[in-house]
């Protein structure tokens, strides 16, 4: 209930403040586990990626944020779950797998942190969760700068086939990470070229 209300409010705010436009949402499966893998340019990315979809999107958030009295309740209500400082531990990975196996959507930033210069510094955690969960992997590109009243776009891409990498071990994770980032950058390039 809180999520539905907050999503409706944020949709209005993002559309007014950042002229948010979501494109190619049909690429996101209507049911089943889905991993949305996106570039990360701002703290405003998680809502932007999730609010335009009709399904609830879950994100990892720093554990200490849940200790902030009002903020903690808000981000919990928005479907976030905690990850401890220092990296993604076994408990977080288990939570992610359970969410995906239950048919939820999870948003992940393969770069791990905000990256505005376009450099590929992706980590293998997103690829590992995507590969081993068996969930659909959908690339997402956030394009724009969240400047007031200037357009920001969220563009979804077709699910990425990574079945050939399942038996490749740690080398497969590296290839999966590269493949995810290639798809994200392809969307950015194609969208920028057509603008």
Image (cartoon, grey):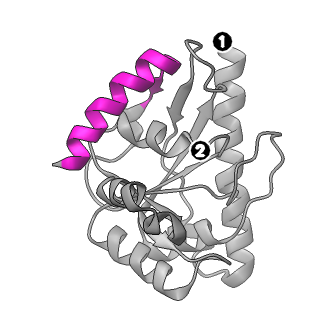
- Element at label 1: loop
x, y percent for residue 164: 60, 69
Q: Is residue 167 above or below residue 8?
A: below
The residue located at (33%, 38%) in the rendering is: 53
Q: What's drawn in magenta, residue-wise?
A: 2-24
Q: Which label was assigned to residue 195?
A: 1
Q: Is residue 147 above or below residue 33?
A: above
Q: Nearer the viewer, mark 2 or mark 1?
A: 2
Task: Spot the residue most to the front.
Answer: 69
Tell me if residue 143 is in the magenta stretch.
no
x, y percent for residue 39: 65, 45
The C terminus - image quarter: top right
The residue located at (26%, 32%) in the rendering is: 8
- Element at label 2: loop
Q: Of residues 189 and 69, which is closer to you in this image?
A: 69
Q: Of residues 78 and 50, which is closer to you in this image?
A: 78
Q: Is residue 88 above or below residue 49?
A: below
Tell me if residue 7 is in the magenta stretch.
yes
Quarter residue 104 falls in: bottom left
Q: Of residues 72 and 170, which is closer to you in this image?
A: 72
Q: Which label was assigned to residue 43?
A: 2
Total marks in image: 2
Left or right of residue 190, residue 119 in this image: right
- The answer to whether the residues at label 2 and label 1 have Cβ atoms under 8 Å apart is no
């Amino acid at each position: 209930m809180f999520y539905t209300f907050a999503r409706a409010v944020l949709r209005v705010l993002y559309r007014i403040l950042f002229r948010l436009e979501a494109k190619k949402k049909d690429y996101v499966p209507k049911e089943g586990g889905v991993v949305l893998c996106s570039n990360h340019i701002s703290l405003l990315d998680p809502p932007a990626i999730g609010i335009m979809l009709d399904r609830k999107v879950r994100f990892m958030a720093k554990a200490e944020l849940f200790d902030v009295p009002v903020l903690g309740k808000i981000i919990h209500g928005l479907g976030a779950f905690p990850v401890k400082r220092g990296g993604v531990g076994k408990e977080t990975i288990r939570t992610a797998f359970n969410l995906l196996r239950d048919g939820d959507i999870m948003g992940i930033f393969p770069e791990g942190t905000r990256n505005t210069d376009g450099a590929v510094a992706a980590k293998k955690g997103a690829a590992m969760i995507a590969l081993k969960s068996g969930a659909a992997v959908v690339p997402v590109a956030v394009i724009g700068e969240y400047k007031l009243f200037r357009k920001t776009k969220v563009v979804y891409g077709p699910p990425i086939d990574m079945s050939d990498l399942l038996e490749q071990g740690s080398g497969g994770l590296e290839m999966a990470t590269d493949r995810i980032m290639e798809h994200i950058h392809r969307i950015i390039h194609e969208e920028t070229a057509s603008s």
